[in-house]
Image: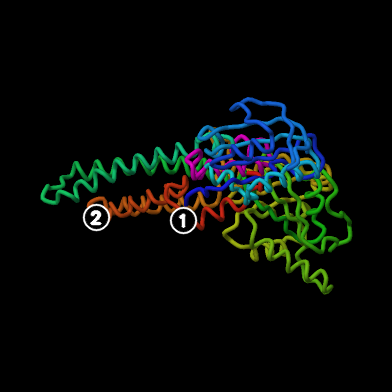
């Protein structure tokens, strides 16, 4: 793909009432447009108070004009920013004037796309712009900024550089088949490959943490009716988002609530109690519960701490849960039994005793829940998307196959080439045009 040679324009601030409205223009030649709308050419990279003029020379608005000549701009092209009054009408009037002067309305993400195509950002950095805007927690914002500054890209480039050096070694041996490959050569290949694989695992771990910060995790509360699922949801969210009643079957539909635990976004899903229901509406709610469970990243199975006759039903619920989804078993209502809040771990199972009514032991649940979904404090985490994780996993698979054929240079060289292609797709050094359209299509119009 190459940047289109036309001028694009968009409002770069949110619609609605506000103090400032910014209209951004980018293109190969903005001299005539700038002269027409400002009546002058502003000095590069200097804020100047200006009047924004219509076709008759009348003032549309007044504000600050900033001009960034190519290539020293966000997009790598000439960029003009008109910072006027906010609101709905004023930015639209300035935008319409720019369109009259030949600019085209920018497509979503087109400014950042041009920055990528003009080598101002690589693809991972470009995606981090949208992630920074969408960040819902301070940790996510810091991780997105690290990616924007190039930390993720540098880590990937380091792996690619090591792969290239190893490929040179392997393919050089292919170019000179008359030379004997001794044991030391094969050992050197293996040592280099092991070092690359170790580095990839470190990058993958940091990327998976960043992906968790970006996407969050879906946690589903399941259990029999009236065991306190809605009470726990309310306590975790800090507000009354679900009705709480002593009447079994009060929750008849799936209730979703977004929360944060230590800066990690979680989507908590409260579900209808699982039991043999005669009520058709309750049956529909139970069916939705089963659908929600299949999509969960973690399951919290709530039970009554008093145990007694409900234990058999709890075992039936456990048996019906997908075996591949991690879960915690929570014994609620210890305020009625007098038991202390505690965590019991044995035989690979984790049981947490708490009270969703008083909050006793909920902090223990929060710690174990973060551990269950795979979060751990790690320095240098950078924001990553699902496609980044897939690319890293693909690269790991190719490296693992390469490790099995170190004595067969032809096969090893091919696996190393495929691993490098997978890594290059992260930064955009090797990617398809349709993928670029999908990525930048999710951006804001003014970005």
Which residue is denoted by mark 1 in the rendering? Answer: 432
Which residue lies at the image location 69% right of the left edge and 65% below the top edge?
290
Q: Which mark is on residue 410?
A: 2
Taking depth in this image into account, of 344 and 365 the one nearest to the observer is 365
Residue placed furthest toward the left? 178
Q: Which residues are magenta?
A: 116-144
Which residue lies at the image location 19% right of the left edge and 51% below the top edge?
174
Task: State left or right for residue 115 relative to residue 307.
Answer: left
Across and down, in percent, residue 208 comes to: 54, 45
Q: Residues within 10 Å of mark 1 (few under 14, many from 20)?
A: few
Q: Main secondary structure of the magenta part?
A: helix
Task: State left or right for residue 126 relative to residue 356.
Answer: left
Rendered position, 205 above or below 280: above
Is residue 137 found inside the magenta-colored segment of the image? yes
Across and down, in percent, residue 355 comes to: 79, 45
Is residue 190 found inside the magenta-colored segment of the image? no
Task: State left or right for residue 274 relative to residue 247.
Answer: left
Q: Secondary structure at mark 1?
A: loop
């Amino acid at each position: 793909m190459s940047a289109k040679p036309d001028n694009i324009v968009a409002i770069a601030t949110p619609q609605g009432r506000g103090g400032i409205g910014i209209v951004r223009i980018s293109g190969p030649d903005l001299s005539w447009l700038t002269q027409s709308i400002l009546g002058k050419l502003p000095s590069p990279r200097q804020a100047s108070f200006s009047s924004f003029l219509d076709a008759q020379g009348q003032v549309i608005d007044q504000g600050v004009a900033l001009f960034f000549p190519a290539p020293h701009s966000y997009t790598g092209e000439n960029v003009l920013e008109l910072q006027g009054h906010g609101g709905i009408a004023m930015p639209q009037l300035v935008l319409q004037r720019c369109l009259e002067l030949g600019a085209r309305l920018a497509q979503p993400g087109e400014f950042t796309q041009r920055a990528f195509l003009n080598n101002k950002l690589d693809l991972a950095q470009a995606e981090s712009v949208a992630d920074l805007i969408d960040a819902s927690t301070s940790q996510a914002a810091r991780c997105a900024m690290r990616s924007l500054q190039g930390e993720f890209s540098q880590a990937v480039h380091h792996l690619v550089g090591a792969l290239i050096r190893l490929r040179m070694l392997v393919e050089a041996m292919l170019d000179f088949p008359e030379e004997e490959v001794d044991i030391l050569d094969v050992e050197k290949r293996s040592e280099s490959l092991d070092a690359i694989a170790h580095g990839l695992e470190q990058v993958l771990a940091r990327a998976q943490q960043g992906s968790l910060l970006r996407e969050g995790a879906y946690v589903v509360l399941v259990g029999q009716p009236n065991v306190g699922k809605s009470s726990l949801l309310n306590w975790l969210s800090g507000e009354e988002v679900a009705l709480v009643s002593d009447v079994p079957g009060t929750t008849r539909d799936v209730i979703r609530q977004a929360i944060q635990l230590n800066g990690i976004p979680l989507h908590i899903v409260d579900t209808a109690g699982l039991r043999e229901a005669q009520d058709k509406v309750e049956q529909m709610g139970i069916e939705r519960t089963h659908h929600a469970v299949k999509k969960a990243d973690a399951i919290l199975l709530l039970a009554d701490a008093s145990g007694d006759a409900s234990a058999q039903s709890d075992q039936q619920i456990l048996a019906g849960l997908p075996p591949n989804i991690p879960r915690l078993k929570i014994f609620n209502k210890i305020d009625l039994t007098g038991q202390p809040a505690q965590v019991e771990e044995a035989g690979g199972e984790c049981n947490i005793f708490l009270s969703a009514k008083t909050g006793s032991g909920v902090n223990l649940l929060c710690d174990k829940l973060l551990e269950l979904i795979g979060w751990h404090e790690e320095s240098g985490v950078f924001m990553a998307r699902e496609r980044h994780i897939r690319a890293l996993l693909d690269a790991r698979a190719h490296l693992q196959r390469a490790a099995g054929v170190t004595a067969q240079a032809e096969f090893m060289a091919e696996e190393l080439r495929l691993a490098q292609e997978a890594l290059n797709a992260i930064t955009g050094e090797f990617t398809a045009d349709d993928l670029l359209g999908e990525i930048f299509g999710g951006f804001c119009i003014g970005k």
